[in-house]
Image (tube, grey):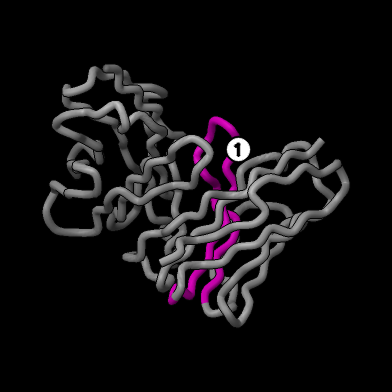
Amino acid sequence: AQSVAQPEDQVNVAEGNPLTVKCTYSVSGNPYLFWYVQYPNRGLQFLLKYITGDNLVKGSYGFEAEFNKSQTSFHLKKPSALVSDSALYFCAVRDGGGGNKLVFGAGTILRVKS
Amino acid sequence: DAGVTQSPTHLIKTRGQHVTLRCSPISGHKSVSWYQQVLGQGPQFIFQYYEKEERGRGNFPDRFSARQFPNYSSELNVNALLLGDSALYLCASSPEASHNSPLHFGNGTRLTVT
């Protein structure tokens, strides 16, 4: 079964510093990977996806993610964090059973302090 | 363009009651999925519908059911509510059911079962 793991419950970073939110995956077949962000009392917002192609994927709000097949990782990154980036971040993988069902990780809280 | 809309936003029910949650997808989107997000966890897949047909079902009991209407809106029904059904229920839509289509989420319905 497809799965993702987010090893950190929370990541703290100072405003202006680079941030990384980690995700590792386990799939059979080709991985289709996604990052979503959730603000309090809101639904999930799509940030970016990896289907195929370049290992560095650029997404919304200045975020990018690096796909690493040998390490089975898909870490989310941003060169310079903003206080407004503080939110709950979810990594997800497409389920192998067809359609566009997603399997989500447990989430990582990102706190950016000024 | 309006995003995915869900109603109601909040709901309080008693154990044993039933509940109906509603979702209107983004205009032009033919696929609707439902997810359950328990506090502190990532969303869990419940159902996917595409063109009014069920395309996938997650590991949820038969108390959970759903349907999609000709206008592509959808309802999620839960019978014989349990305390453990308390969660944020998220609806997501996509243009189609393929693996390339990112999901667009609504803000969810917060269900509290007492």
Range of the magenta residues? B28-50
Q: Measured from the top left, where is residue B28 in percent x and y?
A: 43, 76
Q: In the rendered view, tell whether residue A97 sits above or below residue A113.
A: below
Q: Measured from the top left, where is residue A95 in percent x and y?
A: 43, 56
| Residue that appears at 35% across and 26% down | A110
For the stretch drawn in magenta, what is the main secondary structure?
strand
Answer with left or right where residue B77 lies relative to residue B9. right
Q: Measured from the top left, where is residue A20 in percent x and y?
A: 23, 29
| Residue that appears at 19% across and 59% down | A52
Answer with left or right where residue B10 lies relative to residue A96. right
| Residue that appears at 81% across and 44% down | B13
User: In the orientation shown, which residue stands out farthest toward the right?
Assistant: B16
Considering the image in quadrants, where does the C terminus of chain A appear? Answer: top left
| Residue that appears at 23% across and 17% down | A14
Tell me if residue B35 is in the magenta stretch. yes
Answer with left or right where residue A60 lies relative to residue B81. left
Q: Which residue is mark 1?
A: B38
User: In the orientation shown, which residue stands out farthest toward the bottom?
Assistant: B70
Q: Measured from the top left, where is residue A11 in percent x and y?
A: 33, 22
Toward which corner of the image does residue A51 lie, by quadrant? bottom left
Characterize the local packing of mark 1: few (<14), some (14-19) or many (20 or more) Cα atoms within 10 angstroms: some
Can residue A65 be seen here? The reply is no
Q: In the rendered view, tell whether residue B81 sits above or below residue A98.
A: above
Q: In the rendered view, tell whether residue A112 sits above or below residue B16.
A: above
User: Which amino acid type corresponds to the residue marked 1 in the rendered image?
Assistant: Val
Tell me if residue B74 is in the magenta stretch. no
Q: In the rendered view, tell whether residue A6 sits above or below residue A52.
A: above
